[in-house]
Amino acid sequence: MTMTVAMLLSCDTFESFFGDVLKLDRERYLATYRNDWSWYYARGLLENGIKPILYIPSLGDGGLHETDTGISVRFLPVANWYKPLAGLRRAFRATRWSLYAQERVNAMSFLGPLREALAADGASLLYSQEYWNGRFDHLVHRVSVPVVAADHGGLAQGVVQWFKGAAMRRAAMLHCQTPDECSQVNAFGGRTHLQPNSCDTAQFFPDPTAVRTKTILTVARLTDKQKRTSDLIRAMTKLSKDWTLDIVGTGPDQQMLATLAIELGVADRVHFHGFQPRDAVRTFVRQCGVYAMPSFNEGVCLALLEAMACGASVVASRIRAFTPLISHGENGHLIPVGNPDAIATAVEAAWQNRDALGQAAVATVQARYDSKTLFAKLAASIRTSVRDGGIDASLAGMEAGAVV
């Protein structure tokens, strides 16, 4: 019998992220959107004999929807009482305590539909995106199937941690992207499995006929607090006028970034391309002169892996997720967060040594981050979590509705 796994996306509602940030309605999402971790992971599980269903809280009606990929999507309707609170999401972010409370209240709003869906779908396990938020702390104690939660770029710093020990010990397994993250989770008593993001090297590989030009490329959701795309625009003022910047992606800060480019006098060299399908992204990374990702925080970023797999010379911030991936000066360049001068210097160095850096980047991804290998490990870990349940004996008697 094929195992079914429910994969819960970490967003308040479909409308708050995919609608407000990415400007997608349900129809377009179901028909065309395939470009984030959830679709990559779901496809990897499917290829390893596990049936994934993406679960997304929603302000609209629920329901299970099939797609042309063989991956199903189920929308979980939030309770009516929560809907007036959805518009106050930004206000809740004022403090870590108010944010934590909002995340737990959000989890309460779709807990009933979540339990019903797990039963209706015959799900053997709930895979929850992120474990540093209040949503995970609430749900892990309140569903009847084993819970695996994963690191997809969340940070421990600045979040409420009072309930993490109980929540992490309750989880069947916690998937971490880096060894440092594993150590942090182990300190709370959680069981860890090292599971970085991966790249489909059968689709992303160098094109020997492509001609690279003096273009910086970044592929990112345009939320500047995290992605710091504004640092790239500022770096353009330090580079000669034959450099251009291609920005692929969309998000709430696009207009702010476009205005910044005008104010700095580089708007004619900064090009916004919006959301692009995977084939188009592959063309961009095969042709760029340097791929840059100056983010404040990330998981082992899919877009960066794909750029490296295609032989791009890369510049990335020196953060926990990128230091295991990039050896400075060998397969890319690392720069401090928030330093446009350092970005400009690194871009020039990466361009001058682009062939050697690109070849080393390809070798790194093929040897350590190939999706075929890593998704087989993911599937094996999930099967183990279902088999063992993963819950400490001291917690085995806790009922699904227990208060923590």
Image (cartoon, rainbow, N blue to C red):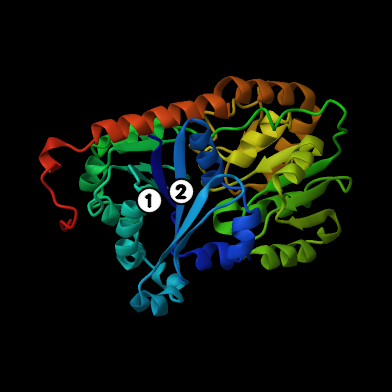
Residue 212: image quadrant is: top right
Q: Amino acid at mark 2?
A: Ile
Q: Is residue 232 above or below residue 59?
A: above
Q: Residue 331: where, in percent of width, then height?
A: 66, 25
Say whether residue 375 is left or right of residue 134: right
Q: Nearer the viewer, residue 112 or 268?
A: 112
Residue at 82% x, 58% y: name it: 266
Quarter of the figure with the N terminus: top left
- Neighbor class of circle 2 (other Cα within 10 Å; few <14, some 14-19, many 20+) is many
For label 1, the residue is: 121
Residue positioned 65% across, 20% down in the render: 363
Q: Nearer the viewer, residue 234 or 38?
A: 38
Q: In this rendering, which labeled residue sits more in front, label 2 or label 1?
A: 1
Pick the front one: 20 or 300? 20
Query: Dot 1: what SS?
Result: helix
At x 59%, y 19%, the residue is 367
Q: Earlier in the sequence, mark 2 or mark 1?
A: 2
Residue 402 at x, y = what percent?
15, 56
Q: Taking the image as drawn, is residue 107 in sight?
A: no
As shown in the figure, which amino acid type bears the numbered disc 1?
Asp
Residue 338, labelled with which disc?
none
Against 17, is 351 above or below? above
> Is there a contact, CB below 8 Å, between mark 2 and mark 1?
yes
**Residue that badge 2 annotates:** 53
Can the viewer see residue 126? yes
Q: Is residue 329 above or below residue 107?
A: above
Image-quadrant location for residue 103 = bottom left
Query: Neighbour class for label 1 at 10 Å: few (<14), some, many (≥20)?
Result: some
Place of residue 389 in the rendered image (x, y in percent of width and height, measured from the top left) = 24, 36
Determine the residue positioned at 62% across, 27% down.
Answer: 328
